Amino acid sequence: MNEWKQAWWLTRSQMSKDKLQWLWSAIFMIYTGSMSGVMLVGQQQTDFINPVVDAFFLLMLPFQGFMFCRRSFRYIHEDSYTQMLAYYRRIPIPEQAVMWSRLQQSLMAFAYNGIFFYGSLYVVNLHSEGFRWDQYLAFSLTCTGYGLVVTGLYIYGEFLNSGKKYLLLSMLFVPIAIGMSLLIRMSGSYGLRLVLDESKSWGLLSPIMWIALVAGVAGLWLFSRLTLKKLVQRDLN
């Protein structure tokens, strides 16, 4: 319970430290959500299945788990994440509390950013397809489940590596996302369309949604446990 209270204190401190992060995050999500809608419209107007649509979604969805604060932009030059962890260790604040705080911030970011991302996507495209609120929510939760898994990977890289190495590891996800989109393309469709169709057909009973959510929560928990185990042994000097 004490670690949970410390984690919540850290979360409130980080969320209130940089007021502009709420604005920058909203602007970025509105932009990416609108661009996603435009790409969907373009895909629907042609018979050619463009793998770029899936690649874009696979890359952009995990960003919903981050708030665009000053520390996020300075992690390469200042190694800001490592500095933050070293500071918390000197106070001292236990690694468990730091991890709980990071998870709290991620979940809050998914909720906040999701409003703008899926809201923009709905305005640009989904409303024209006649999505009900439950179908719209099913689609959002399906995508969030995927985002949670990748967020676990990002936290692993963020907490256990220097800023430059974290950047290199993050860049490796680009060819992976492209490869995944090409594999989906070979099936004769594109993943985003499959998720949209399942969400519209099943609503909140969508099997894909529940599988994605369970996999997302389980993946985030497992990566967090692995990260925490190694973080205790990491040299932050």
Image: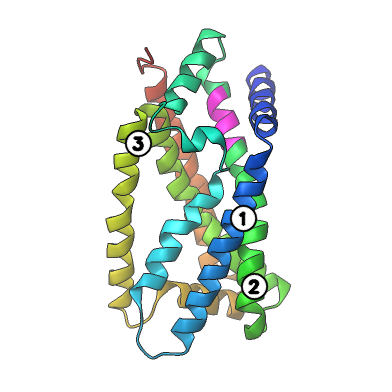
Quarter in which the C terminus is drawn: top left
Give the camera-side residue of 86 and 198. Answer: 86
Q: Residues within 10 Å of mark 3 (few under 14, many from 20)?
A: many
Element type at marker 3? Answer: helix
Label 3, on which residue? Answer: 166
| Helix, strand or loop: magenta stretch | helix
Image quarter where the N terminus lies is: top right
Q: Which residues are magenta?
A: 98-104
Q: Amino acid at mark 3?
A: Tyr
With respect to residue 236, does 12 lie above or below? below
Going from N to C along the chain, the mark reached first, 2 or 1, is 1
Closer to the N terminus: mark 1 or mark 3? 1
Give the residue at mark 1: 27
Tag 1 and tag 3, C-beta contact below 8 Å: no
Q: In this rendering, would 118 be left or right of 77?
A: right
Residue 8, image quadrant: top right
Residue in the image at 69% along x and 23% along y: 9
Circle 1 Cα neighbour tier, 10 Å, few/some/many (<14 / 14–19 / ≥20): some
Which of pointers 1 and 3 indicates the residue nearer the eye? 1
Disc 2: which residue: 122
Q: Residue at x 50, y 60 (%)?
A: 211
What type is the residue that disc 1 sits on? Ile
